[in-house]
Image (cartoon, rainbow, N blue to C red):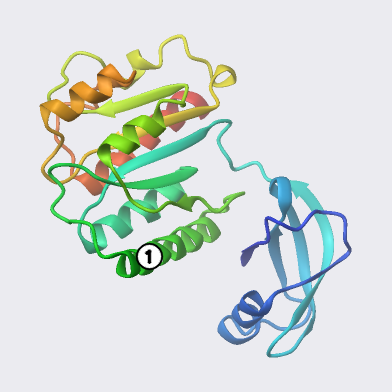
């Protein structure tokens, strides 16, 4: 079912008037008609089942049929600090991690990144594209929020920002002792508000980055006997987290 996000609108009204972009999407892109149903996610993750009431090219009005809380979100926030990878790899990472429940994605320029920072205007355009990919993935997967794709930061800043999380996981190919399961031992989902996850670039993290992360409170962990590609590793870690706390 078609899904829109209007997270600034509070539940309670019997009629919802869509803005220009959403109106264009419903009337011109999807070509929906009167009486067709869709879901609108409102403030506080409230889902409103609606039907198209009136529509023109520039404005669509919806009738609210019923509301209910969204139940698809994890009980804690997951922030993914993803080292920037080339083109489709980064886009695939964003898409799949949104499907798996990530709350925020922070692109990171670490020392071995093949991709280097763009000039500000070009980078802003790229970040906007990544955000659109996150929106489409959130629609497809029934999310209760649209995860934020932040502006890229350097590795040192990412480590500093991640320190506020309850758990900081740093998967690293040179770590062979501590597993994610062991790192989460004794930490219930009720006691956790945020988990931060670092994923390295195509060339992996170097020793100094792993050491900086450990000194800042992160736990270096192994995620198995095989070395995963950067676009696979984030989705794998999120799957492990959700299995541990949801299934």
**Residue 145 x %, y %:** 59, 50
**Residue 26 x %, y %:** 64, 78
In the displayed structure, would residue 105 be above or below residue 210? below
**Residue 44 x %, y %:** 72, 45
**Residue 66 x %, y %:** 83, 56
Secondary structure beneath label 1: helix
In the displayed structure, would residue 101 be above or below residue 152? above
- 190 or 72: nearer the eye? 190
Which residue reaches farthest top?
A: 186
> What residue appears at the point 50 percent right and 25 percent down from the top-left corner?
245
Q: How many marks?
A: 1
> What residue appears at the point 50 percent right and 61 percent down from the top-left corner?
135
> What residue appears at the point 24 percent right and 27 percent down from the top-left corner?
223
> What residue appears at the point 45 percent right and 61 percent down from the top-left corner?
131
Which residue reaches farthest bottom?
A: 57
In the displayed structure, would residue 172 be above or below residue 101? above
Q: Is residue 203 left or right of 126 when viewed as pictured?
A: left
- 1 or 84: nearer the eye? 84
User: Image quadrant for the N terminus?
Assistant: bottom right
Callout 1: 10 Å neighbours few (<14), some, many (20+)?
A: some
Residue 67 shows in this picture: yes
Q: Is residue 63 left or right of 97 when viewed as pictured?
A: right
Residue 1 shows in this picture: no
What residue sits right under mark 1 in the picture?
Answer: 124
Q: Is residue 86 left or right of 60 when viewed as pictured?
A: left
- Occupied quadrant, residue 121: bottom left
């Amino acid at each position: 079912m078609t899904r829109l996000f209007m997270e600034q609108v509070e539940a309670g009204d019997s009629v919802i008037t869509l803005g220009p972009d959403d109106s264009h999407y419903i009337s011109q892109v999807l070509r929906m008609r009167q009486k067709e149903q869709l879901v609108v996610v409102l403030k506080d993750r409230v889902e409103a089942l609606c039907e198209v009431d009136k529509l023109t090219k520039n404005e669509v009005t919806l009738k609210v049929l019923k509301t209910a809380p969204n139940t698809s979100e994890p009980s804690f926030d997951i922030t993914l600090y993803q080292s920037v990878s080339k083109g489709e790899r980064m886009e695939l990472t964003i898409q799949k991690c949104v499907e798996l429940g990530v709350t925020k994605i922070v692109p990171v320029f670490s020392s071995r990144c093949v991709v280097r920072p763009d000039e500000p205007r070009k980078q802003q355009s790229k970040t906007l594209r990544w955000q659109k990919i996150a929106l489409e993935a959130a629609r497809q997967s029934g999310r209760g929020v649209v995860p934020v794709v932040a502006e890229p930061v350097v590795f040192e800043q990412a480590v500093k920002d991640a320190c506020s999380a309850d758990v900081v996981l740093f998967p690293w190919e040179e770590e062979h002792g501590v597993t994610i399961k062991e790192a989460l031992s004794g930490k219930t989902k009720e006691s956790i508000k945020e988990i931060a996850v670092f994923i390295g670039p195509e060339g992996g993290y170097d020793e100094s980055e792993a050491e900086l992360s450990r000194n800042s409170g992160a736990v270096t962990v192994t995620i198995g006997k095989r070395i995963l590609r950067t676009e696979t590793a984030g989705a794998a870690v999120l799957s492990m987290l959700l299995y541990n706390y949801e299934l």
